[in-house]
């Protein structure tokens, strides 16, 4: 479990394989303040729900000899109690046919992640569950989250789902996810840098968080965000090992990264301006530092 600040998200992982549980846990912990619990069987999972009280459940398809989906059905039918019938649930599997995805959705899973997965993919699915909460459906043939996952971007008729926006200029789910992930890393880096002022060894954690943020932007394939996060990583890695970081340079990076994450791709000129201003500011500050030395 996370030993720092209070966890902002509690995730229960139901998987009988220790190695796979660790992979999921490390992916989530690299994201931020996440508390991870484990269960090796369906019965253990149902018992753990009451005392761990997770926000998200991650279930392996192969749990109990290939009966992971049965756990999802038991959950939706209320076997763990009414409070957990609507628990956000992700199924992780190596099964990858359209029929397998349909089976998971029909069992009541909210999301489906194919193994092997990247940290970005898993975190994105968890973020989607937090941002796009779907209606819960109860009918004679199905109990679980609404299975209508994606809207038609060309559709201009009435919006029927709770997460449909009447404002066509509103952020898409992908943009909201990008904002959330980047902000978490930026806040974590800022906190780590403040802690490192009293603990030089903490610079390794700062460097690692910057590297993770840089990797995240690469996964997003956002060229300008990649440029800003890579610049921050290179600065921290190059300077932090032997000198005190320039607070203005670091803050300029963090502010620009947040701006780039929040500005939609449609505002390409403004995003480009943010990147150029960052480059100019960093170059100026580093030149001043060199002259002072």
Image (cartoon, helix red, strand yellow):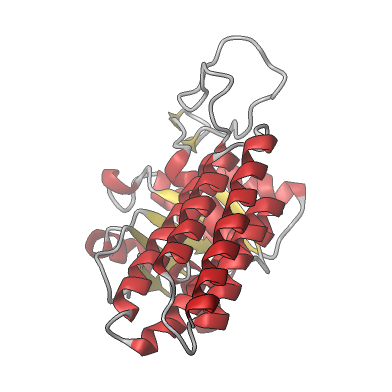
- Spot the residue most to the front: 291
Residue drawn 22% across and 64% down? Answer: 51
Q: Position of residue 177 (x, y in %)?
A: 53, 46
Residue drawn 60% across and 64% down? Answer: 283
Q: Which of the two residues, 34 or 51, is positioned nearer the viewer here?
A: 34
- Relative to 224, does residue 41 appear above or below in the rendering? below
Query: For the N terminus, which image quadrant?
Result: bottom left
Residue drawn 28% across and 77% down? Answer: 3
Residue 208 placement, left or right of 52: right
Count of numbered circles on the image: 0
User: Could you say which quadrant of the image residue 199 lies in?
Assistant: bottom left
- Relative to 176, does residue 47 appear above or below in the rendering? below
- Relative to 162, does residue 292 appear above or below in the rendering? below
User: Could you say which quadrant of the image residue 202 lies in?
Assistant: bottom left
- Relative to 141, does residue 38 appear above or below in the rendering? below
Q: Which of the two residues, 5 or 190, is positioned nearer the viewer here?
A: 190
Q: Is residue 8 visible?
A: yes
Q: Position of residue 81 (x, y in %)?
A: 27, 48
- Spot the residue most to the right: 97
Residue drawn 25% across and 68% down? Answer: 5
User: Could you say which quadrant of the image residue 251 lies in?
Assistant: bottom left
Q: Is residue 214 visible?
A: no
Q: Position of residue 142 (x, y in %)?
A: 51, 34
Q: Which of the two residues, 279 or 103, is positioned nearer the viewer here?
A: 279
Q: Which of the two residues, 101 or 277, is positioned nearer the viewer here?
A: 277
- Spot the residue most to the top: 157
């Amino acid at each position: 479990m996370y030993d720092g600040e209070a966890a902002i998200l509690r995730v229960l992982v139901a998987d009988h394989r220790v190695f796979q549980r660790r992979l999921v846990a490390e992916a989530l912990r690299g994201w931020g303040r996440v508390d991870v619990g484990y269960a090796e069987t369906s019965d253990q999972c149902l018992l753990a729900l009451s005392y761990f009280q997770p926000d998200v459940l991650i279930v392996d398809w192969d749990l109990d000899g290939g009966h992971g989906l049965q756990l999802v059905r038991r959950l939706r039918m209320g076997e763990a109690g009414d409070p957990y019938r609507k628990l956000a649930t992700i199924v992780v599997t190596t099964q990858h046919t359209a029929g397998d995805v349909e089976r998971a959705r029909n069992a009541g899973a909210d999301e489906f992640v194919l193994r092997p997965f990247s940290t970005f993919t898993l975190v994105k699915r968890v973020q989607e569950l937090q941002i796009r909460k779907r209606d819960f459906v109860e009918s004679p043939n199905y109990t679980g989250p609404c299975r209508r996952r994606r809207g038609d971007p060309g559709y201009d008729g009435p919006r029927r789902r709770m997460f449909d926006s009447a404002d066509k200029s509103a952020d898409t789910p992908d943009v909201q996810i990008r904002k959330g992930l980047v902000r978490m890393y930026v806040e974590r880096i800022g906190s780590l840098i403040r802690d490192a002022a009293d603990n030089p060894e903490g610079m390794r954690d700062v460097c690692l968080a910057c590297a993770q943020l840089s990797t995240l932007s690469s996964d997003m394939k956002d060229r300008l965000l990649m440029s800003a996060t890579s610049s921050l990583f290179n600065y921290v890695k190059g300077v932090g090992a032997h000198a005190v970081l320039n607070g203005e340079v670091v803050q300029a990076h963090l502010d620009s990264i947040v701006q780039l994450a929040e500005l939609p791709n449609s505002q390409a000129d403004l995003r480009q301006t943010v990147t150029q201003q960052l480059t100019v500011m960093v170059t100026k500050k580093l030149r001043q530092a060199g002259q002072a030395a």
